[in-house]
């Protein structure tokens, strides 16, 4: 993938819209790159996170609607997002990773898809604030980056 691209999982994508902890650092990082890249299922994770924010009363119903519409519009029309497909090679990479993984590794399926997708598409690093993704990234040959806890 191009040097002007950065791979974000949904924990970072959400911070482009919500003022969760570390959102300012994530937004600064995003501003340094021409494209924000994620696996296509990250779109679903983001809208689910917006709904969770409403359920937890961090945003009201009107704000939830606005966030949802803004994200969908930008996710489908803005040139700075690149959504990577979940190909057969991505699934095979996930299957191999689970086969080799230690019994101590906590790896959710959606997280494994992010990691495999990033690796399959030539990324060497992923940005996340999810401790499970950060711990599992080396199993996919990826560097785990978190500008939120690094500061």
Image: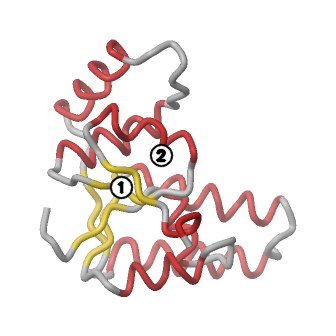
The picture quadrant where one finds residue 99 is top left
Residue at 49% x, 69% y is 147
Q: CA distance from mark 2 to mark 1?
A: 8 Å
Residue at 44% x, 16% y is 102
Mark 1 closeness class: few <14, some 14–19, many ≥20 residues within 10 Å: many
Q: Are marks 2 and 1 in contact (CB under 8 Å)?
A: no
Q: Nearer the viewer, residue 61 or 37?
A: 37
In the shown orientation, is residue 39 left or right of residue 62? left
Mark 2 closeness class: few <14, some 14–19, many ≥20 residues within 10 Å: some
Where the N terminus falls, by quadrant? bottom left
* Residue 3: percent from left, percent from top: 15, 72
Residue at 66% x, 65% y is 50
Please tell me whether residue 125 is drawn above or below residue 100 in the rendered image: below
Q: Residue furthest front?
A: 151
Residue 109: which numbered mark, if any?
A: none
Residue, disc 1: 126
Q: How is the image coloured?
A: secondary structure
Residue at 42% x, 58% y is 145
* Residue 16: percent from left, percent from top: 53, 77
Please tell me whether residue 1 is drawn above or below residue 124 in the rendered image: below
Residue, disc 2: 134
The picture quadrant where one finds residue 6 is bottom left
* Residue 13: percent from left, percent from top: 49, 67
In the shown orientation, is residue 7 left or right of residue 67? left
Where the C terminus falls, by quadrant? bottom right
């Amino acid at each position: 993938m191009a040097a002007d691209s950065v791979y974000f999982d949904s924990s970072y994508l959400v911070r482009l819209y919500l003022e969760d902890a570390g959102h300012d650092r994530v937004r600064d990082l995003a501003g340094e790159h021409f494209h924000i890249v994620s696996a296509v299922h990250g779109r679903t994770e983001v809208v689910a996170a917006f709904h969770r924010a409403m359920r937890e009363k961090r945003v009201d119903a009107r704000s939830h609607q606005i966030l949802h519409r803004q994200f969908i519009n930008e996710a489908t029309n803005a040139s700075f997002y690149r959504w990577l497909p979940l190909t057969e090679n991505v699934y095979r990479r996930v299957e191999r990773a689970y086969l080799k993984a230690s019994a101590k590794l906590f790896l959710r399926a959606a997280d494994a898809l992010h990691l495999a997708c990033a690796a399959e598409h030539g990324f060497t690093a992923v940005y996340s604030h999810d401790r499970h993704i950060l711990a599992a990234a080396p199993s996919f040959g990826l560097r785990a980056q978190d500008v939120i806890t690094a500061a």
